[in-house]
Image: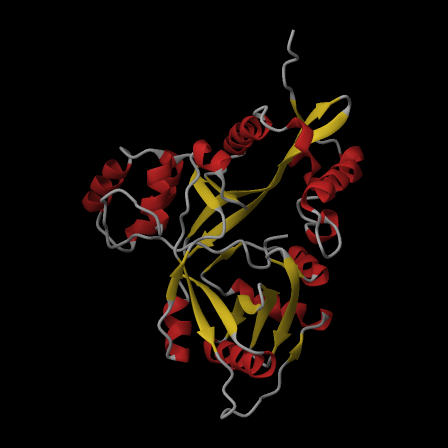
Amino acid sequence: MTKKMQIKRLLPSRLKEAIEFADRIFKPKDGSMGKNFPVLFSKENAHNILIVEEDERIVAMAGMYYAYAQIFSMRVKTVFVGAVCTDEKYRSRGYATSMMYETEKIALENDATLMMIHGDNGIYRRFGAVSAGTYFTIRIEPNQDISMRDFRRATDKDIKKMAIWYWREPVKFVRPFSRFELFHKVGHTWDALAKTFINDSAYANFVRKERMNHCVEFAGDPIAIKLLIQDFANKYGPTMVHMNFANKECISALFSKTPRRRNFYGTMKVLDKFKLSEQLKDYLDEAINKSEKERLLKSLSRFNNSDFTKIVFGSTEEAPDFHYDVFPIPLPDYHGMDYI
C-alpha cells in the first residue's frame, strides 16, 4: 500500500536541518540560505515552513512569510513563497504541487489576499500563478562631465534616517524598524550580496548580478536619489535602476530617460479576489464615483483569480481585454531589500 503524503509545519527545533536541506538543493555561493534569508529561516517563522518527510528526513520544503504591501491608502496582506524544493530522489511525486496548494490554504486562513512567488515554472503556472506587476528599468551610464559629490556606504548610525525616508514612500512593503536593522545587517538583496550607499537626503541599495550593477531599492528626496545613483554609476559603472509604477515617472524624468517595461522576477496570484475587491473600494473612491466603482468591481468579479491578477496589477503577458484608467495598480517589488 502506498504511503499517503503528509505535509507538516516545521518545528523550530528542526530549523538547522531545514537550512542544511535548502543549502544542499540551492547551493548558495555566498554564505547559506539561513544567513541570506534570516526572515524566512527564523525560529519565529519556522511554523510557516512546510515540509514533507521520508524515512524521518526532510525531502521537500516550501517556505512562507508575510508582509503588508502599502499601496497609497490601501494595505494588502501578502504572503511571500520561496525555497520551494524537493530532494532529487523524491521528485515527480507531486510534493511541490501539493505544498503550493497547502500554502494557499494556510495563507487564506491568515487573511492574505496576494501571493508573491520567487520563481516561474510549470508547478507555479499550473497552480494559477502568473507573471504580473508593472515594473520598469532605466540604464544609467557614467557621466564624467558631472563632478562627484559626497556619498558613502551606509552604517548602523544611518538606519534611523533611512527608515524614515523609506516610511515616506507611497508604495512599499510595511517594514518595522527592527526589520530595517536586520536587512542592513544581512547585506543581501535579490539573492546577491548588496551594498547600501547614502548621501545627505537619500539612500540606494545596489547588487551586482550577471555582470551588471542594479539599483533595486531607493528612498528619500527624488533629486538626491538621482544624484546618488549617478555618482554610483560614475564610480562603479553602468547601472540598471529598477522602479515600480508609482515612482518610475519621477525618476525617469529626472534622468531624462525613457523607462523600459520589465517582468516581475517571479510569479504571483491573487488568492481571494472578493476580499481584494473590498480592499479596492476605498482606494477607488478617490478616482471614480460610487456607481462606476460598483460596475467596475462587478465586471472584475467574473474573471478567475489569475486573470484578475493580470488585470488589476498589470502584466507583460497576454491578458483579458479589460482596460480601465485606474489599472494597473502599482506594487512594491519584493526583490528589493525585502527579499531576505
Residue lying farthest to the front in this orientation: 89
- Depth check: give the residue in front, 326 or 131: 131
> Which residue is at a point 59% across and 55% down the rendered structure image?
338
Picture coordinates of residue 21, whole percent (x, y): 74, 38
Q: Does residue 51 lie above or below 287 as drawn?
A: above
Quarter of the figure with the N terminus: top right
Q: Does residue 195 lie above or below 113 as drawn?
A: below
Residue 196 visible here: yes
Q: How is the image coloured?
A: secondary structure
Question: In this rendering, would 181 be left or right of 130?
Answer: right
Question: In this rendering, would 258 be left or right of 77?
Answer: left
> Which residue is at a point 56% across and 59% down the rendered structure image?
336
Question: In this rendering, would 276 be left or right of 39?
Answer: left
> Which residue is at a point 64% across and 59% down the rendered structure image?
192
Picture coordinates of residue 143, whole percent (x, y): 49, 87
- Please identify the quarter of the rendering in which residue 63 is found: top right
Residue 9 visible here: no
Question: In this rendering, would 264 be left or right of 299?
Answer: right
- Please identify the quarter of the rendering in which residue 87 is found: top right
Picture coordinates of residue 335, whole percent (x, y): 55, 55
> Which residue is at a point 33% across and 33% down the rendered structure image?
304
